[in-house]
């Protein structure tokens, strides 16, 4: 990307790998930086989706597609629990996604009373294309970063992902093990 999306991220002074601020200030600075990065990504994503998507979906519908991609087949009740949404809302979202051709409803293999949701081939293609556009946008930005910063970003994102998934980061485990 050749244009600036927003103001520069706030930074925390770090000496080596040890921060010169308190742990609470480090957490707040990290949360603030993460929020700013998320806002930048939202700008990148919406720009890419608006420019190239033949059938754009809302962020809520996109969450449904990501969940189906990760956990299919899934029934409406379980999908609602994963999304934290009411069954009627989930059903309406799936109706719209089915109308777009992104989702298929199939009889459940375990219960005749339930219906399973799956991504259709068109839904899989949509996600693949969307992810490709997003990766291209990220590569445009990341390629301008120095190699050491790219490595630090990759390490930080792995730790962040582990924390989101309920695990602990490798550095947190090492610190806990050495204590």
Image (tube, helix red, strand yellow):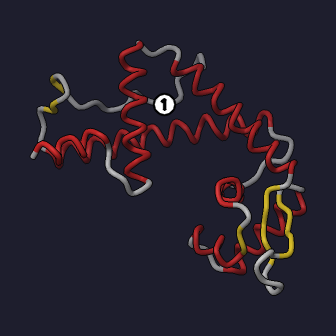
Residue 97 appears in the figure: yes
Identity of the residue drawn at 17% across and 49% down: 24
> Where residue 137 sits: x, y (%)?
63, 26
Residue 99 appears left or right of 151:
right
Identity of the residue drawn at 9% across and 46% down: 179
- Foreground residue among 78 and 19: 78
> Where residue 8 sits: x, y (%)?
40, 27
- Foreground residue among 112 and 8: 112
Residue 94 appears left or right of 86:
right
Residue 60 appears in the figure: no
> Where residue 60 sits: x, y (%)?
66, 60
Residue 100 quadrant: bottom right
Tell me: residue 139, above or below residue 67. above
Badge 1 density bin: few <14, some 14–19, many ≥20, Cα 10 Å? few
Tell me: residue 74, above or below residue 154. below
Provide the residue designation for mark 1.
Answer: 6
Farthest residue toward the bottom?
113
Residue 136 quadrant: top right
Residue 4 appears left or right of 20:
right
Q: Secondary structure at mark 1?
A: loop
Farthest residue toward the front?
110
- Foreground residue among 140 and 5: 140
Q: Quadrant location of the N terminus?
A: top right
Identity of the residue drawn at 16% across and 33% down: 19
Residue 165 appears left or right of 170:
right
- Foreground residue among 114 and 178: 178
Identity of the residue drawn at 71% across and 68% down: 74
């Amino acid at each position: 990307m050749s244009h600036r999306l927003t103001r520069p991220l706030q930074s925390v002074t770090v000496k080596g790998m040890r921060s010169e601020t308190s742990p609470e200030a480090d957490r707040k600075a990290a949360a603030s930086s993460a929020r700013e990065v998320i806002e930048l990504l939202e700008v990148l994503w919406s720009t890419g989706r608006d420019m190239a998507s033949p059938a754009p979906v809302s962020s809520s519908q996109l969450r449904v597609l990501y969940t189906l991609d990760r956990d299919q087949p899934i029934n409406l009740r379980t999908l609602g629990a994963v999304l934290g949404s009411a069954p009627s809302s989930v059903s309406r979202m799936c109706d719209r996604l089915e109308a777009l051709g992104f989702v298929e409803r199939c009889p459940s293999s375990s219960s005749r009373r339930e219906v399973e949701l799956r991504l259709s081939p068109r839904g899989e293609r949509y996600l693949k294309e969307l992810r490709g556009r997003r990766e291209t946008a990220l590569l445009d930005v990341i390629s301008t970063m120095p190699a050491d910063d790219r490595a630090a970003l990759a390490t930080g994102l792995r730790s962040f992902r582990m924390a989101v998934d309920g695990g602990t980061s490798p550095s947190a485990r090492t610190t806990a093990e050495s204590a």
